[in-house]
Amino acid sequence: MIFSIHCYYLSSPMDAVLFQISYTLGDIDKAAVQFWEVLHTYRIFAFSGDLGAGKTTFIHHLCDHLKVEDVVSSPTFALINEYHFREEGKDSTIYHLDWYRLKDSAEAINAGMEDCINEAQKGAARCFVEWPEKARELVRGPYLWISIAPESVNERNMTVTLIN
């Protein structure tokens, strides 16, 4: 098996791109560990990519790394899943939001998604948002825009950009 994780950490504050990584599905756990090591101080993570790009899969492996106590699954129909993990000896909350089915931002607000974003901005939770393009105006900076693109059936490229 070829180990194919490649990370690039861009340290200049002038760079909008904070992190880039290429990984195979066999190395996704290692990619999730490196992702969290570099970006764990952020609260809002907006995962963008085509259908089947691997957004939910990456989030699942990230939650495995964090030892999330709850069952991690796609919130496509529930719209919001809430997970818990221990961080620095305290209970921490992750809101996993899926905006794929949303018609507009009003629908997201009615579903309570704006409250989840506000909790994350106050530092009381973290939000992992899939399909943020559907109601981008609800996600206010600073947050991370994570683009996932399939390079092949088994390989993904991820670029993480800080949005202020």
Image: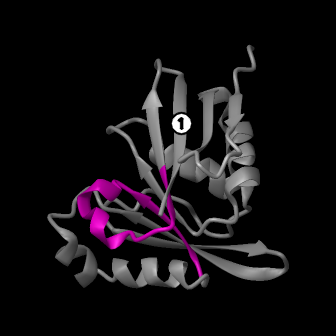
Q: Answer whether residue 128 is magenta in the image.
A: yes
Q: Is residue 66 left or right of residue 135?
A: right
**Residue at the spot of label 1:** 158
Q: Is residue 58 left or right of residue 81?
A: right
**Residue projecting furthest to the front:** 14
Quadrant that contains the N terminus: top right
**Residue projecting furthest to the left:** 103
Q: Answer whether residue 132 is magenta in the image.
A: yes
| Residue at image location 53% in from the left, 47% down from the top | 16
Q: Secondary structure at mark 1?
A: strand
Query: Is 161 rendered above or below residue 117?
Result: above
Q: Is residue 118 left or right of residue 24?
A: left
Circle 1 packing at 10 Å, graded few (<14), some (14-19), many (20+), is many
Q: To which quarter of the image does residue 31 belong?
A: top right
**Residue projecting furthest to the top:** 2
Q: From the viewer's side, name the closer residue of 100 and 34.
A: 34
Percent across and percent down for residue 73 are 49, 58
Percent across and percent down for residue 121 are 52, 79
| Residue at image location 35% in from the left, 77% down from the top | 113
Query: Is 155 rendered above or below residue 135?
Result: above
**Circle 1: residue type:** Met
Q: How many marks?
A: 1
| Residue at image location 74% in from the left, 47% down from the top | 33
Percent across and percent down for residue 147 are 45, 42
Percent across and percent down for residue 47 are 45, 51
Range covered by the magenta-colored residues:
125-145
Query: Is 29 rendered above or below residue 83?
Result: above
| Residue at image location 40% in from the left, 71% down from the top | 140
Q: From the viewer's side, name the closer residue of 110 and 84.
A: 110
